Amino acid sequence: MAQAVPVSASGVEFFAEVDTPSGPSNVALDRVFSFDGVRETVQAISWELLQAWEAVRPDEASVEFALTLKVTEGRLTGLLVSGGAEGALKVTLSWRRGTDSTTDAGIAGGVVAG
């Protein structure tokens, strides 16, 4: 079930729609949540992708992914995947060979929670 909860990031407060736990829960949804858990999730995913890009050294790289916001253990978290579900990353890597040609390698893959 989704519910709007107040969130604070860098001194700015806003509302975020989050998936809340199903069934009984002692998570207090009436307080302002920190965006730190979501930021940490994005940083961790980005760091891992950066390591891969440094290995293959493309001239350009981009990635698209979506996060689901969830309140878990009283903390706002960003989830790429949940439980045994699959999530998708769309990765585009580009290499330029010389001045005339550009080679693009688009890779769309699934990431499985482990």
Image: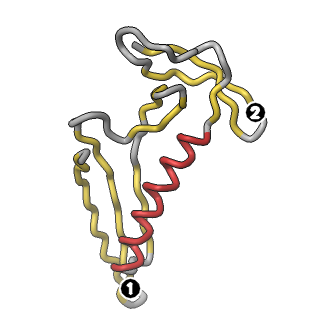
The picture quadrant where one finds residue 51 is bottom left
In this view, 40 is above or below 69: below
Q: CB of mark 1 within 8 Å of CB of mark 2?
A: no
User: Which mark identifies residue 15?
Assistant: none
User: Which mark identifies residue 100?
Assistant: 1
Type of residue at label 1? Asp
Seen at 32% across and 50% down, the residue is 89
Q: Nearer the viewer, mark 1 or mark 2?
A: 2
Neighbour tally class for label 1: few under 14, some 14-19, many 20 plus, Cα within 10 Å: few
The picture quadrant where one finds residue 107 is bottom left
Type of residue at label 2? Val
Q: Could you tell me residue 98's position as x and y percent?
A: 39, 90
Say which of 75 and 104 sits in front: 75
Say which of 92 and 52 sits in front: 52
Seen at 46% across and 28% down, the residue is 72
Say which of 98 and 42 sits in front: 42
Quadrant location, the N terminus = top left
Residue denoted by label 2: 12
Seen at 68% across and 25% down, the residue is 14
* Residue at disc 1, secondary structure: loop
Neighbour tally class for label 2: few under 14, some 14-19, many 20 plus, Cα within 10 Å: few
Say which of 100 and 56 sits in front: 56
In this view, 15 is above or below 82: above
Q: Could you tell me residue 29's position as x and y percent?
A: 57, 15
Instruction: Work out whether mark 1 precedes mark 2 in sequence or the reverse, and give the earlier one.
Output: 2
> Which residue is the extreme one toward the bottom?
98
